[in-house]
Image (cartoon, rainbow, N blue to C red):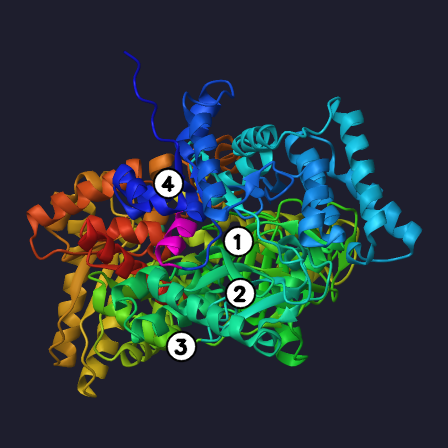
Amino acid sequence: MSKKAAKYVYSFDELRLAERAAGSADGVRALLGGKGANLAEMAKLKMPVPPGFVVTTEACKAFLAAHERFPKGMWEQVMKAIGGLERATGKKFGDPRNPLLVSCRSGAKFSMPGMMDTVLNIGLNDEVAQGLARLSGDERFVFDAYRRLLQMYGSVVLGVPGKAFEELLSGQRARRGVWNDADLPTEDLKAVTAAFKKLIEEQARRPFPADPFEQLELATQAVFRSWNGKRAFDYRKAAGIPHDLGTAVTVVTMVFGNLGADSGTGVATTRNVTTGEDQLEGDLLMNAQGEEVVSGARITLRIGELARLLPAVDRQLRRIVHVLEKHYRDVQDVEFTIERGKLWMLQTRNAKRTAKAAIRIAVDLAKSKLISKAEAVRRVAPEHVDYFLHPQLDGAVCAKARDEGAMIAEGLNVSPGAAIGQIVFDADTAEHWAKQLKKKVILVRPETRPEDVHGMLAAQGIVTSRGGRTSHAALVARQFGIPAVVGASTLEVSAERKQMRTPGGKTLKEGDWLSIDGGSGEVFAGKLETVVPDVTDPYLVALLDWADGFRRLGVWANADYARDAERARRFGAEGIGLCRTEHMFFEPERLPIVQSMILAPGAEQRAEHLAKLLPMQRTEFAALFKAMDGLPITIRLIDPPLHEFLPSRDELHRSVVELETRIRLGEGDRAALESQLSSKRRLLESVQAMHEQNPMLGLRGVRLGILMPELVRMQVRAILEAACACARQGVKLKPKIMIPLVATKAELRLQRELLEDEARKVLKEQGVKVRYEFGTMIEVPRAALVAGELAEFAEFFSFGTNDLTQMTFGISRDDAETGFLSEYLHQGLLAHNPFASIDLDGVGQLMETAVRLGRARRKSLEIGICGEHGGDPASIAFCHRVGLDYVSCSPFRVPVARLAAAHAALADAKA
Ligand code: PEP
Ligand code: MG
């Protein structure tokens, strides 16, 4: 008994059957492809769609799996469907007396514009062309259609290079002395048709098939095959579309826009997809076929002209697109053809749009109740929000610059936004040029160090040739919203010679102009133009407001100073999750005091220097408390290794050798040189004594607090003295004091006892009641595993996922991304960069463990994250799932985090 063949072909009026087979609207799109499903949908809505049918993606998959053989029964179903078209149109496939012509178009579940193949005008041959010419009375039109079929068929189906056809056409144009194909007379098109047939026969070693059914069969195979073409494969890889979906083939009765002045063709979007304004936008070409509108060969008319040329068609089109937008509840991008005054809809799909338009459209659609507020929030992507926060390089300008070879390097896109400025190679020059000379500068360094911060802050943008996503340069840049590209490793940067060489051999010097795109990681030579988006855009404000209503996670910011805190609040931050106090030590006027404090020979001298630092920190903390006015503030005690505050060992070494040489050669004032030498030697000795092979795994965090208790005591004193002063002025506050890099319960207990002692002392002295909390960072895998024990001594946890990732993988966060990690990513050994997005399997498990153990020991334990991952949408979704209380990120990521947290909550509600 033979099994009944599966159904592989659906005509446009069989949408119900397809729905039944596929189970859902999404299933129908997967089965019929987006184009086929939407054409069937339009037919159901009684819109003027030319009769047609779809050969399913299932057929494509079966074809590709069976060494390019159609599945059993498919072709018979196609023949039957052609019969259906013949009945619907009253025409006949291959009949010169009244011929039916069809197009054969690709169409997968997800739109892949231009990535697969399409053949138009199938059904034409010499006899049919003669017949059609008699029928239409327009021989020129017929031979134009015929040569297009030969051209498309030859290249797509028979593999003749497209260039060969183009050369024949341009030869004909040259002989006739015209620029456009539209100006070639009938006899020229006939000659081209003959030449194309000859070309096919020569190059494909077979004649163009005259049988329309054979044309259709081979074209269908070619479209199926194009699913695995290189273009399509690469596109899917980049767009994250699975490779096993297959494409459908949509066969549609041809309608012609090139049949005279009352014919035409066009494309339109139901709203302006650049700005989001609610007005029909599009292009129109009278007396033309579809591809001419997109190819740009002829100058198009604005869609508004249709009202003047064919007012009734214009009214009908506007009615249709209005219904389509309502039906799909989204902005549509349509293609249509007008054949002798009759409108035909050829395609509709959700329109692609800019970030600005995406937000405005989502808000407008929700306000007009077409979609819910939740849907509006869901439809806006984090990168759409990001766009509003930074000036951007103009897209067209960038493309031109790329074409002209002005793109000189690509690095990691660590801090979005565009920056344009003159190159400087050191921080002092950056600051001098920016502040005194009022120049815009880009600081270019091999890498940055804490002592470069003043120059980084003065710069429009930062470029480094070394360093990764959590390198110093990246961290500072993101925190301050300075566009930055780091790890542009093909640039040879020589800070000493104040120049850099590009891989193309160009040398750029101090003062030359540079433009960078921190969103894409591109670096351009020269001064490119930017467009400045608006952060107070009312649509953005409304959308983020709605997002806040859906999210459960709090969104806090990493901010060290009052000015950052104020900005973070403007962007919607509800607290400070990380104030890195050591950043205050790097201020130029404070650094010498910090250095003297570190190098002090005894406790007494050290106390002297600490006493000088105390009022400085107190002032900063008071300003921070006032800026946040009652919102939670987490202040982390000193973390980096102390030698980071000292001059570099290598530089000191060089100075010592240089001084020794000058003394030996008898240069300069010997006494002065010797005094300099002895002080440099002392300094070098101290620096050498503190030298560590692996400072990132050395005397950092709580270890510093344990070895140098007076330093952290001073910090706690500064925090609480500032808190008392603010409380007296009526500022509400509850500082959260955070102890970093803890690995054991003993460390935390010891440190907490010490600091509690200082805290009680301060409150007693001040006579003010201020509530405060102690907590710790979970940055070492061991801390996550013993989180229950740590929770005994911590009222809150904050995941320092920069360190936690570094220590879990054993990959240095500063070096990895420009080293082997990029190779790992390239080879697919890692699916994504764990420093950008939390590694769920490893680091994520540790986090889950810490949350579970911590909350089991202390129910009220508040848990957040303050590593760079706190601003990454995928990581935010994970933080939501494991039940963190808040995420903390740089102020400029706050709006993105608000949206991502809402997305996470909405996904939860849906699941
Ligand atoms: C972290 O490690 O994730 C963190 C926030 O601390 P830092 O980046 O200052 O080491
Ligand atoms: Mg850390």
Left or right of residue 272: residue 579:
left
To which residue does mark 4 refer? 30
User: Of residues 34 and 367, which is closer to you in this image?
Assistant: 34
Task: Give the magenta-colored segment's residue range.
Answer: 37-46
Horizontal side of residue 671 vs 12, given as left or right: right
Q: What residue type is labelled 2?
A: Ala
In this view, the residue in front, 245 or 443, is: 245
For discs 2 and 1, the disc positioned in front in the rendered view = 2
Mark 4 → mark 2, Cα distance in angstroms: 25 Å
Name which residue lies at 18% across and 86% down.
728
Q: Distance between the residues labelled 3 and 4?
A: 51 Å
Q: Does the magenta stretch include residue 45?
A: yes
Residue at mark 2 to residue at mark 3: CA–CA distance = 46 Å
Mark 3 neighbour class, 10 Å CA radius: few under 14, some 14 to 19, many 20 or more: few
- Residue 514 position by quadrant: bottom right
Question: Mark 2 and mark 1: span between their CA atoms?
Answer: 34 Å
Q: Residue 281's spot in the image, x, y percent?
A: 54, 70
Amino acid type of the residue tagged 4 in the rendering: Ala
Mark 2 and mark 3 residues within 8 Å of each other at the beta carbon: no
Residue indicated by mark 1: 413
User: Disc 3 designates what residue?
Assistant: 563
Res 670 → quadrant: bottom right
Local secondary structure at mark 3: helix
* Nearest to N terminus: mark 1 or mark 3: 1
Closer mark to the observer between disc 2 and disc 3: 2
